Each structure stands twice: as structure tokens, then as C-alpha cells.
Image: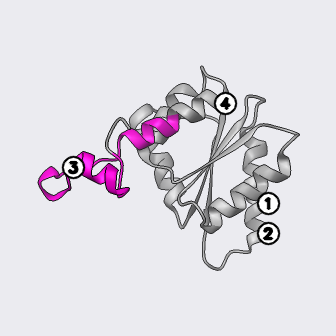
């Protein structure tokens, strides 16, 4: 089974785990790292690596972060790069609940690469304007590069 490590600003990683388990039930091989503004970044990096060690059973690990370019994402990427060649680690930045639910459902049955692809596709698919009267028509948003419509 693919291991999961959620890394975020503040307590968001813990809340994402709670929300995921609310939808799909209790999960094993899942760890969280919550990064605060006063935390030492080297300690955080060691914490991420320790979590990767704890959830890795040989099928790979996905580190999910809250925002591309943020400290959690940068630290996760550094950990993944430092471990390249020794084990399979993928980093997904910009996690959302549909992505996480999909990954939880496929991580026991699919290899790392396809599982990551399916999760990202699900995460993108479920980003939509829920109040269409207030949004530009879907085609117009895509043409302007301002967003994606479900299924694209």
C-alpha cells in the first residue's frame, strides 16, 4: 500500500486527514506534519523524513502539501529529492479533499504513478463554480485561463 504524508501550514494536514477518514473510513500508513511560523525548518524536514520512513512499506510514498511554492511544499520536495534513487516518493502540491479521497481509495490497488495521476485528475475534476449565475460560462473561463471546468 502506498504511504501518505500530509504536510501543511498550521494544523491543516491534521484536518485533511480527519476529513478524509470521515469520508473513506480509518486509514493506515498516513502521517501528518504541521508546520508553524516559529518552527525550525531543519527539524521540519527531519520530521517529514521520519514520517516517510514510518509509512513506507515498499510501494512508495506520496507527500501531499497544501500549496505549491510554500514552505511545506519546498521542504517536501527537498526530502523527495534527497531520497531519489533510494525509494519512490512523489510530491503533490495543492491537495484538496477529492484528490485525497481518490488517493485513499486507489493506493492499495494501483502502483504509485497511476495512483498519483488518478488522484490529481479527481482533484482537478471537482474544482467548479457552485453558483453558476455568478461565474463566467465554463468555456469562457477556460479560454481566459482563469480556471478549469469539471472534467478537463
- Residue 129's place in the image compared with 119, above or below, is below
Query: Can residue 45 be seen here?
Result: yes
x and y percent of residue 152 in the render? 38, 38
The residue lying at 61 percent from left, 34 percent from top is 28
- Residue 125's place in the image compared with 93, above or below, is above
**Which mark's residue is nearer the viewer, 2 or 3?**
3
The residues colored magenta run: 119-148
In the current view of this chain or complex, which residue is farthest to the right? 86
x and y percent of residue 126 in the render? 35, 41
**Which mark's residue is nearer the viewer, 4 or 1?**
4
The residue lying at 42 percent from left, 45 percent from top is 97
Q: Is residue 24 left or right of residue 14?
A: left
Going from the N terminus, do you reach mark 4 or mark 1 first? 1
- Residue 132's place in the image compared with 60, above or below, is below
Alpha-carbon neighbours of circle 3 within 10 Å: few (<14), some, or many (≥20)? few
Do the CB atoms of the residues marked 3 and 1 lie less than 8 Å apart? no
Q: Element type at marker 3? A: loop
Going from the N terminus, do you reach mark 3 or mark 4 first? 4
Query: Can residue 1 be seen here?
Result: no
Q: Element type at marker 4? A: helix
In the current view of this chain or complex, which residue is farthest to the bottom? 38
Task: Give the residue at mark 4.
Answer: 112
Query: Gap in Å between the C-alphas at discs 4 and 2?
Result: 27 Å
The residue lying at 44 percent from left, 32 percent from top is 24
Task: Give the residue at mark 3.
Answer: 130
**Which mark's residue is nearer the viewer, 3 or 1?**
3
Query: Gap in Å between the C-alphas at discs 3 and 4?
Result: 32 Å
Task: Give the residue at mark 1.
Answer: 46
**Which mark's residue is nearer the viewer, 4 or 2?**
4
Amino acid at each position: 500500500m502506498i504511504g501518505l504524508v500530509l504536510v501543511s501550514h498550521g494544523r491543516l494536514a491534521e484536518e485533511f486527514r480527519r476529513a478524509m477518514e470521515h469520508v473513506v473510513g480509518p486509514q493506515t500508513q498516513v502521517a501528518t506534519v504541521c508546520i508553524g511560523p516559529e518552527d525550525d525548518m531543519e527539524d521540519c524536514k527531519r520530521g517529514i523524513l521520519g514520517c516517510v520512513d514510518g509509512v513506507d512499506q515498499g510501494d512508495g510514498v506520496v507527500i501531499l502539501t497544501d500549496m505549491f511554492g510554500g514552505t511545506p511544499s519546498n521542504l517536501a520536495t527537498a526530502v523527495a529529492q534527497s531520497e531519489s534513487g533510494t525509494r519512490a516518493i512523489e510530491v503533490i502540491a495543492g491537495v484538496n479533499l477529492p484528490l485525497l479521497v481518490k488517493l485513499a481509495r486507489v493506493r492499495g490497488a494501483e502502483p504509485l504513478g497511476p495512483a498519483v495521476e488518478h488522484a490529481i485528475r479527481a482533484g482537478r475534476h471537482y474544482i467548479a463554480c457552485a453558483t453558476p449565475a455568478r461565474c463566467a460560462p465554463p468555456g469562457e473561463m477556460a479560454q481566459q485561463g482563469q480556471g478549469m471546468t469539471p472534467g478537463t
